[in-house]
Image (tube, rainbow, N blue to C red):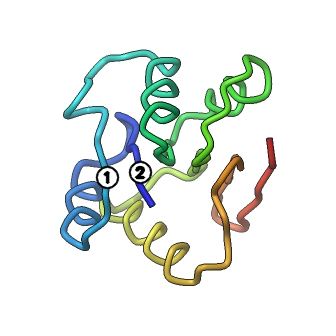
Amino acid sequence: MKFLANENVPFSSVTHLKSLGYDIKAIGIDNPSITDEQVMQIAIAENRTIITYDSDYGELIFRHGYRPNAGVIFIRLQPEDPLETARILEILISKNILSFDKNLTVIDSNSIRQKKY
């Protein structure tokens, strides 16, 4: 599984996931200030799951037709700790109960929802 961390994902979470062996790229490092559409294009071209705190990705999928095969994970809560994003992903991946492929996965403090596209 390959990930693409949007600019709003804390760098410490990206670094932590890399240290655990995950294949993750960070927009804030590799392509700072690009548009959400360009992030989608990278995710599609490289078959990466987008990790974001930006709600605009649902609109890009369902209104504008972007369809990253590897999916999008939208974390709807603001992290109190910069490593919280990494911890959330570690738990989700270790449980191996969700498929992110062609899904918008929405995570908030009370639930995890997925919408297929």
Residue at the image position 51 percent from the left and 74 percent from the top: 93
Q: Amino acid at mark 2?
A: Phe
Quarter of the image holding residue 7? Answer: top left
Q: Quadrant of the C terminus?
A: top right
For label 1, count other residues whose C-alpha is less than 10 Å away and answer few (under 14), some (14-19) or many (20+). some
Pinpoint residue 18: horizontal percent, then vertical percent. Answer: 23, 62
Q: Which residue is mark 1?
A: 24
Q: Which disc number belongs to residue 40? A: none
The CA distance from mark 1 to mark 2 is 5 Å
Q: Helix, strand or loop at disc 1? A: strand
Q: Which residue is mark 2?
A: 3
Q: Is residue 15 left or right of residue 113?
A: left
- Comparing 71 with 107, the one in front is 71
Q: Amino acid at mark 1?
A: Ile
- Comparing 107 with 22, the one in front is 22
Residue at the image position 29 percent from the left and 41 percent from the top: 26
Pinpoint residue 40: horizontal percent, then vertical percent. Answer: 52, 27
Residue at the image position 66 percent from the left and 25 percent from the top: 66
Image marks 1 and 2: residues in contact by CB distance under 8 Å: yes
Pinpoint residue 103: horizontal percent, then vertical percent. Answer: 71, 49
Q: Is residue 43 above or below residue 91?
A: above
For label 2, count other residues whose C-alpha is less than 10 Å away and answer few (under 14), some (14-19) or many (20+). many
Q: Earlier in the sequence, mark 1 or mark 2?
A: 2
Quarter of the image holding residue 62? Answer: top right
Q: Helix, strand or loop at disc 2? A: strand
